[in-house]
Image (tube, coloured by chain):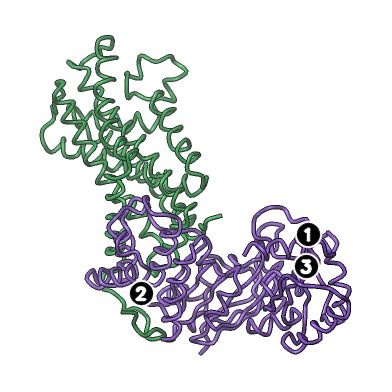
Chain colours: A purple, B green
């Protein structure tokens, strides 16, 4: 039985079409990463599947139950961690978890034991007795995720669970999710980080403007995005345009050039295979490199290839959609170097 | 222990609704003693109301047939304190909405009335405390029950019931306006208007003619009148029935409306 099946889900808010016929399926025990820019419809999708919103069209089954006809049956089988840390700042971490456990129907002692166990796993034990208002943003986020795990639900919804977490907190969360999926929990998570889905060995759906524009494993999507990326660093004084010109014939797509940084990024289909050719052409042209790296495309680059525009990481208005491709390519460069 | 998932759903429970209401009530009672604003609304404000109103108006106002103004005043300002305190209920539910707490609660296998009922139950316990506190402070200033212990108990019960109606009204307001600050104002505004156009501070007969008709129909006049009858003595049955009718009418509208709103509420 599939953990989640959605068929032609549609949802409008007034004139805004949030979801426009989304189909997806998550086999029991799988991990599905839903990627998309802000406003793409990710949160609306999660809210419909978690019984918080009624779709205008289509239908969905979660853990075998229709979300519209049997919402209570669905709720007994899901955990939800939304985009905000939905924890009470005036309760302690432990009190928050015990409250949620009790509302799931766990006996007091069991709720207490689960709370202690989860605070330990998410490295919150020392803070469990403190009021949540004293927590950092990352700690609140982890507590929120712990709350969604309290009843060990077979299906878990996580809406950008690692946004705002520091690397340490992200690793702790990934470890817990890895354990859960290893034991058969099905997870749907929205994320901006493709590494997150890779890490959890899942499949990916990319949604944009309320529709699914691509799906597959992270590797398949990255292959669709034009294979690997070759990062070439030009030494000071050497024109990166010359580098691009010498090597563009080897690329699977147009090179992106960052003049100020002296960097060229070339999409390549068979990265390791063309490295000797790269060396040969550079030697023939008398060009030098101060740095070379072969890597998989970033999420931004996959997006650029699949949607023709980079994902927006903030709520800022997007200018890129109408801008020329070269501008978008430069922006990719800028964000990549920041990671 | 992270138990094997994908297994059976959670077991059903004997009295799930009551247990859930108790859990939510516990949460709100904890908040009550930990959130400074809530604590002030429940302790300092009621005491100040008794002290300030009785000192400020006590010398100037002599109500015919009532020996001490505090006897006349206390029922009115009990209603005021409860009405003001209830505005915090609207603030709290709007906060829960904007922080995603409501999303979380709505994703849990609990009755849609449980979160609201738990809130109202905690309010009722707070109001019981507020009423007893005001009676104690009032008693120090000379307030006495004149109609016997049964009537006194009925007065306390009526005051707490008034709080229930205020709480449900503010839950509805908070869920409707969504923004915590606006919810606070939306809750205070009707209480202020109705309080000063009622018989809470002065008898209706002393008001200008155009205001008297409104003041007589004003629910705060009706409720205060019933409380006064129960505290001071005199015929209490009819005022109590009228007050109960107001409260039941208000509850009959606000409870289903608030629950319906809650069922469709999500953070923006």
Q: Is residue B44 above or below residue B71?
A: below
Q: Is residue A173 left or right of residue B125?
A: right
Q: Which of the two labelled residues, at mark 2 and mark 3, occupies the earlier sequence position?
A: 2
Picture quadrant where residue B10 is located? bottom left
Of labels 2 and 3, the one closer to you: 3
Q: Are marks 2 and 3 in contact (CB under 8 Å)?
A: no
Residue A334 visible in image: yes
As measured in the structure, the alpha-carbon distance from the residue carrying label 2 to the one carrying label 3 is 55 Å
User: A209 or A18, which is in the foreground?
Assistant: A209
As measured in the structure, the alpha-carbon distance from the residue carrying label 1 to the one carrying label 2 is 43 Å
- Percent x, y for residue B161? 29, 43
* Secondary structure at numbered mark 1: helix
Question: Which class describes the residues within 10 Å of circle 3: few (<14), some (14-19), or many (20+)?
Answer: many
Chain letter behind tag 3: A
Residue A320 circle label: 1
* Residue wearing tag 3: A234
Q: Is residue A301 left or right of residue B6?
A: right
Give me the residue at 70% from left, 63% from top.
Answer: A17
Of labels 3 and 1, the one closer to you: 3
Q: Is label 1 on the same chain as label 2?
A: yes
């Amino acid at each position: 039985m599939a953990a989640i099946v959605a068929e032609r889900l549609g949802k409008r808010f007034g004139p805004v079409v949030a979801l426009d016929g989304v189909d997806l399926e998550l086999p029991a025990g799988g991990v599905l990463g839903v990627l998309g820019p802000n406003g793409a419809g990710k949160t609306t999708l999660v809210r419909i599947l978690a019984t918080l919103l009624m779709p205008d069209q289509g239908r969905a089954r979660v853990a075998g139950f229709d979300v519209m006809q049997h919402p209570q049956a669905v709720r007994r089988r899901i955990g939800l961690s939304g985009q905000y840390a939905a924890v009470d700042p005036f309760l302690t971490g432990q009190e928050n978890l015990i409250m949620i456990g009790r509302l799931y129907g766990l006996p007091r002692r069991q709720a207490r034991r689960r709370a202690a166990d989860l605070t330990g796993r998410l490295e919150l034990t020392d803070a469990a007795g403190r009021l949540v208002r004293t927590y950092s943003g990352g700690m609140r986020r982890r507590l929120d995720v712990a709350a969604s795990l309290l009843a060990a639900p077979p299906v878990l919804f996580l809406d950008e669970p690692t946004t705002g977490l520091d690397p340490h907190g992200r690793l702790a969360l990934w470890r817990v999710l890895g354990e859960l999926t290893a034991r058969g929990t099905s997870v749907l998570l929205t994320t901006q980080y493709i590494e997150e889905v890779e890490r959890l060995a899942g499949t990916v759906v990319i949604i944009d403007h309320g529709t699914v524009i691509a799906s597959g494993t992270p590797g398949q999507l990255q292959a669709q995005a034009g294979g690997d990326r070759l990062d070439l660093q030009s030494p000071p004084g050497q024109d990166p345009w010359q580098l691009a010109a010498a090597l563009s014939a080897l690329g699977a797509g147009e090179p992106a050039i960052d003049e100020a940084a002296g960097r060229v990024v070339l999409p390549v289909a068979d990265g390791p295979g063309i490295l000797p050719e790269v060396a040969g052409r550079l030697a023939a042209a008398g060009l030098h490199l101060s740095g070379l790296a072969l890597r998989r495309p970033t999420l931004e680059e996959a997006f650029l290839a699949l949607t023709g525009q980079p994902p927006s990481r903030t709520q800022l208005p997007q200018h890129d959609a109408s801008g020329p491709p070269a501008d978008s390519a430069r922006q990719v460069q800028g964000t990549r170097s920041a990671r | 222990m992270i138990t094997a998932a994908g297994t059976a759903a959670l077991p059903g429970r004997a009295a799930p609704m009551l247990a859930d209401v108790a859990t939510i009530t516990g949460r709100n009672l904890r908040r009550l003693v930990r959130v400074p604003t809530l604590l002030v609304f429940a302790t300092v404000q009621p005491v100040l109301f008794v002290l300030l109103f009785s000192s400020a108006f006590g010398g100037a106002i002599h109500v015919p047939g009532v020996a001490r103004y505090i006897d006349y005043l206390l029922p009115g300002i009990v209603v005021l304190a409860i009405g003001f305190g209830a505005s915090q209920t609207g603030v709290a539910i709007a906060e829960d909405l904007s922080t995603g707490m409501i999303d979380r609660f709505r994703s849990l296998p609990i009755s849609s009335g449980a979160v609201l009922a738990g809130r109202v139950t905690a309010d009722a316990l707070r109001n019981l405390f507020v009423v007893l506190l005001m009676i104690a402070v009032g008693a120090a200033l000379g307030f006495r029950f004149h109609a016997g212990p049964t009537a006194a108990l009925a007065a306390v019960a009526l005051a707490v019931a008034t709080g229930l109606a205020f709480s449900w009204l503010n839950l509805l307001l908070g869920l409707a306006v969504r923004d915590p600050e606006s919810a606070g104002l939306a809750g205070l505004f009707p209480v202020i208007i109705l309080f000063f156009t009622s018989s809470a501070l002065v008898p209706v007969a002393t008001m200008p003619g155009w205001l008297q008709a409104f003041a007589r129909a004003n629910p705060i006049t009706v409720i205060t009148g019933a409380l006064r009858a129960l505290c001071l003595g005199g015929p209490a049955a009819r005022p109590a029935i009228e007050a109960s009718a107001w409260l039941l009418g208000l509850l009959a509208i606000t409870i289903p409306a608030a629950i319906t709103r809650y069922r469709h509420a999500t953070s923006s």
